[in-house]
Amino acid sequence: MPRAPLPPPPPRRPGERGQATVELVALLPVVAILGLGAWQVALAVHTMWEATVAARAAARAHALGSDPEPVVARLLPGGFDDHARVTTADDGAVSVEVVLPAITGGALTTYTATARFEPQ
């Protein structure tokens, strides 16, 4: 049995031409800002993770009687180790302070990770 032809689409109103384009152009800055915000959060979390790993390794080295600063310099990615500050407390805790970078350049704030191991 043959199918009946589809009815023609309704006529467009004159004011609706280009509406999708206008909406897309209006939303592009919002999408860009959300993407940059997500990238900034990912960068901050990665930096905090790296600082925590470096602090644990430095505390382990300090507990074994080694200098923790070369360990931090080796573990932190390039650029972070230049601005990292390593401090050792009397109780054996090692703190690593790093700068949380901004995606636009510069720094947002600093983050300090602290770890401690019993002396071996």
Image (spheres, grey):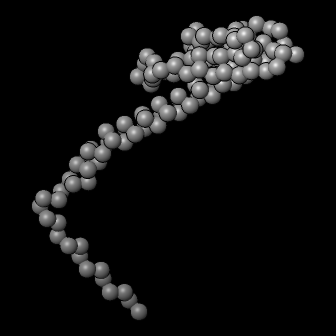
Residue 112 rendering spot, x and y as whole percentages: 59, 20
Relative to 12, does residue 112 appear above or below in the rendering?
above
- Res 58 visible: no
Q: Residue at x 37, y 86 (%)?
A: 3
Residue 110 rendering spot, x and y as whole percentages: 52, 19
Q: Quadrant of residue 86?
A: top right
Relative to 68, does residue 30 appear above or below in the rendering?
below
In this view, the residue in front, 21 or 34, is 34
Residue 54 rendering spot, x and y as whole percentages: 69, 20
Q: Quadrant of residue 119?
A: top right
Q: Decide if residue 108 is on the left or right side of residue 25.
A: right
Q: Residue at x 44, y 25 (%)?
A: 103
Q: Residue at x 30, y 80 (%)?
A: 6
Q: Decide if residue 14 is on the left or right side of residue 27.
A: left
Q: Quadrant of residue 116?
A: top right
In this view, the residue in front, 17 or 39, is 39
